[in-house]
Image (cartoon, rainbow, N blue to C red):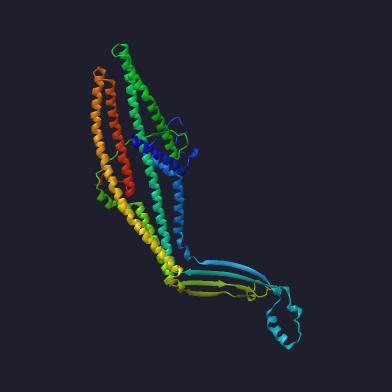
Amino acid sequence: MKRNIMIFRKMFLLAVIFTSGTTVLSAQDTGGLPADNSQPLILTVEQAVAYATKNSRTLRSAEIDLAIKERADKYSWNVFVPTVSVSGTMNRANEYSTTYADLLNPLYKALNAGFQLPDSYNKESDRWSAVGNLGVSLNLSLALIENIRATHAGYEAGRITWDQTVKQNEQNVRKLFYGLLLQQENLKVLEDTLENARQRAKQAEINFKNGQVPELSMLQAQVTYENQRPTVDKERQSVSQQLDTFAFILGMPVGTKIQLDGKIDPEFLTLNADQVYRHYGESNLDIASLKKNIGILKMQLNALNLKSYTPALALSWSSQPYLSDITGSWSNSDNWFDNGNLSVTMAWTLSDMLPFSANRQSAKDIQDNIRKLEISLENTRQNNELEVRKTVDRLEQAHQAILSNERNIKLAQRSYDMTSVAYRNGTKELLDLRDAETQLNQAKLGALNEQYNYMSYMLDLEYMLNTHLTGDVK
């Protein structure tokens, strides 16, 4: 029992670290919390899971990651949207030049006429030009289709990761909830023991005053009572502190008092490890994630192969209106002419097919990564099957231990009752009564401990199989 309590306290330490992924509710977002701390908040295990799911920063961060992947998947078709660009340019030439000058100057220079063009041909407006441009282009390749499929698969992989995060959060909260119930039951047993010791000390004092027992018996009963008080007080304080920590983990305001509404009452199932794994083994989220990532790499490899072994089609159309006379009417269509064009280009990078090219080396890297993930997948399958077998065995062991402890409780209770009567009649010593009480407490706590173990193992098994097991599973 002490070992389980120590394990539970370590879980709480990890949970405090986990609180770095939780946020505290604001005053206006308490969602049913009491306005003050006069009354504790009664909390079931399902409500605890809901609070933690709502207020976990870890989940909020994972939700943002999923939203990014969802948006990428939703608009993955935008690779087929053509690129459209618009521009306008005003130019001023540094040196004067006209069409007439370009044609006549060589002739005049050849005749050595020393002729100078009239000033009317050397106007400032002739240095200026206005050019507009409207371009539309679209590149098409079979590789684009595989890239779209890979993007969709990436979103599906993101959903698996999201499910893993949510289920891990739920599993941790449930274990902490039932662990707290176990500690509370342990405290109840200690309080009952302390109350019995108090009543025995009081009765011993009465008997001593009546001359029925010696002073030593009275002092022994009082010492026993006083020795147990610090232990019970310490355990009571520990439970109270861990309830406060649990409320903080769930994302409730600091100082919120909670009262757990639940009990450790496992539903016992008869499970066959082979049959269970055969039905649910492939539902494991680690396996699903690896399979999805393998599929993504295969799509990326197909896209790379299509890029290497198939040509790409480039479509382009442009309109480039040019103003011939900047001083003329800009609305006159005769003052404009279009330098644009329509082009259709088929391009194929033949060097990408060479075995030593960067493209082919990238393909080999992807193939090696696929093989690595396939090895990891096989290893995960075998490890999960082994863990399922171990967990089913632990469940059966815990079940048998619970049945044994229930029989022990009946025997220990009968022994304690008989010893208590004998002690009151003076035929048994106080030490005998304490031994009988210790055996009874150990039997009770042993049963509670094994019940908690059973529920904890069942949570582990359900997480591994990614399903909720019921009494219908045989």
Residue extending farthest to the bottom is 111
Rendered image quadrant of residue 262: top left
Query: As drawn, is 461 to the left or to the right of 125?
Result: left
Residue 26: x %, y % from top left = 49, 39
Nearest the eye: 464 or 333: 464
Q: What residue lies at 47% left-to-right and 43% top-to-bottom?
A: 20
Nearest the eye: 447 or 269: 447
Q: Decide if residue 142 is in sight here.
A: no
395 lies above or below 294: above
Q: What residue lies at 40% left-to-right and 29% top-to-bottom?
A: 234
Residue extending farthest to the top is 210
Q: How many marks?
A: 0
Residue 192: x %, y % from top left = 33, 26
- In the picture, the quarter occupied by the N terminus is top left
Q: Decide if residue 247 is in sight here.
A: yes
Q: What residue lies at 30% left-to-right and 11% top-to-bottom?
A: 211
Q: What residue lies at 34% left-to-right and 29% top-to-bottom?
A: 188
Residue 279: x %, y % from top left = 27, 52
Residue 8: x %, y % from top left = 37, 38
Rendered image quadrant of residue 18: top left
Query: As drawn, is 322 to the left or to the right of 414?
Result: right
Residue extending farthest to the front is 216
